[in-house]
Image (cartoon, rainbow, N blue to C red):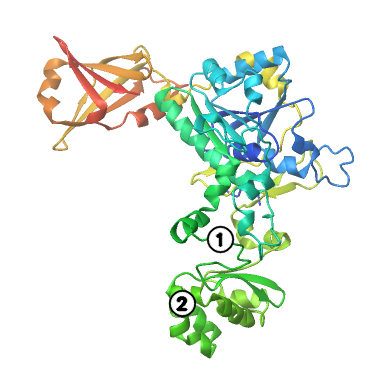
Amino acid sequence: MKAKNQSLEQGILKGIRVLDLSRMLSGPYATMLLADHGAEVIKIESAEGDTSRRSGPFEKKDVKGDWSGYFISLNRNKKSISLNLKNRDDIVFLKKLIKKSDVLVENFRPGVMKRLGLSFDEVSKINPEIVYGSINGFGSEIFGESPYKNWPSYDVVAQAMGGLISLTGYNEETPLKVGPGIADIFSGSLLSFGLLASILKSRETRRAQFVEVAMYDAIVSMCERAIYQYDFNNVIPRPEGNGHPLLAPFGIYSAKDGFVAIGIVEDSYWVVLKKIINFDDLLNDLKYGTIALRAQNRNELNKKINLWTKQFSKKELVKLLGGRVPFGPVNNVKEIFEDAHIRQRNMILEIERPFGGGKSWKVAGNPIKFKGFKSLSLRPPLLGEHRELYVDNFGSIISNEPTIFFQPQKRDYSCTITIRTTDNSVSEFYDCSYTWLKSKENYLICSLEKNKFVPLQNSVSAVSFNFSKVIEEKDNHKEAIDNLNINLSMRDIAEISFVHTEVEILITTKT
């Protein structure tokens, strides 16, 4: 359950700093996904801490209630600073920290951040390149004013209003909430995507970005099937129990010792399944031979499948069906803990307790994997644990300036320009001078002697710029230079401009 290959690089998101003002589930889940992969997530908490610190469950020996399972699961790999956002000095410090951060995340009700002087407009004045992420029940007026904009919302409200509960359960008389906090978790997952997309755009444009997820919107998008069913057929979808309105067999079926899932979509899988079951009436292609026929006769078909499955245990059905048709046992959490898949893919993390001693905590792992990088499994922070690191040593905190925008100077680095022509011939020029221009965006301007370059100009297809240290010595900016060289390699001619002077050609590209 611990990472097996210690040679992997630690965290693909290293170098991204996130200020996490969110609490409970949706926002902390979004920032957890980033922290697991190396982002520096600083959790800003009140003196009482995130509400989830007090939500439990607690182990019996934790008589003081210091470590809630809820909090541990969502706040691993983060740091904590306790601030009073109604205190002027604390707000002043937070605004200083905003200047050195890439991202701010909040999930307060609309209007709260504005009252604190921390709206997107205010924060983007402090840091013109900040990514500002927001989750709430119904969104802000920026993307369309909701009549419910001031309503408080939690998971069950979004599940209800977004249509999920109307589709869940056995009938309309007994509505059923989905077990996990899916509205929070799905909203948080969407926000993490939005944050990373916004970081890319912010680094390209050097302008602040605002990204928002309304939980109501998220659940409507999750229930996409109901939208087109209503549009195409004027049908209001109802709860289908464990079945599917358009497919069969597709759902949950009984076993001797529990339940299993079978999901047949393609006809090819149906051919395999009916031969395994080998009931004479299931071989009737006039009744079950196509997707449409199976859907039309789904009630009786599902009953026949269930008659067959309940003759066997889950393990027996694994042997009969596993790998041959879309199939899986319905696992409880004990069975998940014991599953080899979970162990092999590190989907239950072990987190060491603070101050050592006792068995490790176990929490759900991060499903997003990156080749060459491992995710982290550091313990969650004590409330305000990192105050000294950030408050008392503020001057030593590295700016959030992306390494890709490091600007080498002529005294330290030379620049080689490689010209590729339309016939794929390559020419290199070593004797250039260069400078940097910053307006709304950053530009690199290199100069070449006119008589060397003019014969090539009309056939240029791509240009590369490569910086190297003038004097061979340890380069403290090697990572930044490597990133810059990658960014400036083989720029298409459309990304380059040429300006003629009397004696030289100026080659300009946006960085």
The answer to whether 302 is drawn above or below residue 329 in the figure is: below
Task: Tell me which corner region of the image, top left, top right, bottom left or bottom right, holds residue 299.
Answer: bottom right
Q: Which mark is residue 123?
A: none
Identify the residue at the far top of this view. Answer: 502
The answer to whether the residue labelled 2 contacts the one labelled 1, judged by CB atoms less than 8 Å apart, is no
Check disc 2 and report the residue beneath it. 293
236 vs 290, left or right, is right
Residue type indicated by callout 2:
Leu
Residue 463 can be seen in this image: no
Q: Tell me how many marks there are.
A: 2
SS category of the residue bearing label 1:
loop
SS category of the residue bearing label 2:
helix
On the image, the x and y values in percent for residue 231 come to: 46, 55
Check disc 1 and report the residue beneath it. 237
Identify the residue at the far left of this view. Answer: 455
355 vs 170, left or right, is right
Residue at the location (52% across, 78% down)?
A: 297
On the image, the x and y values in percent for residue 317 come to: 62, 76
Dot placed on the residue nearer the N-terminal end, 2 or 1: 1
Callout 2: few (<14), some (14-19), or many (20+) C-alpha neighbours within 10 Å? some
How far is mark 2 from mark 1, CA to CA? 20 Å
On the image, the x and y values in percent for residue 464 come to: 27, 29
The answer to whether 196 is drawn above or below residue 348 in the figure is: above
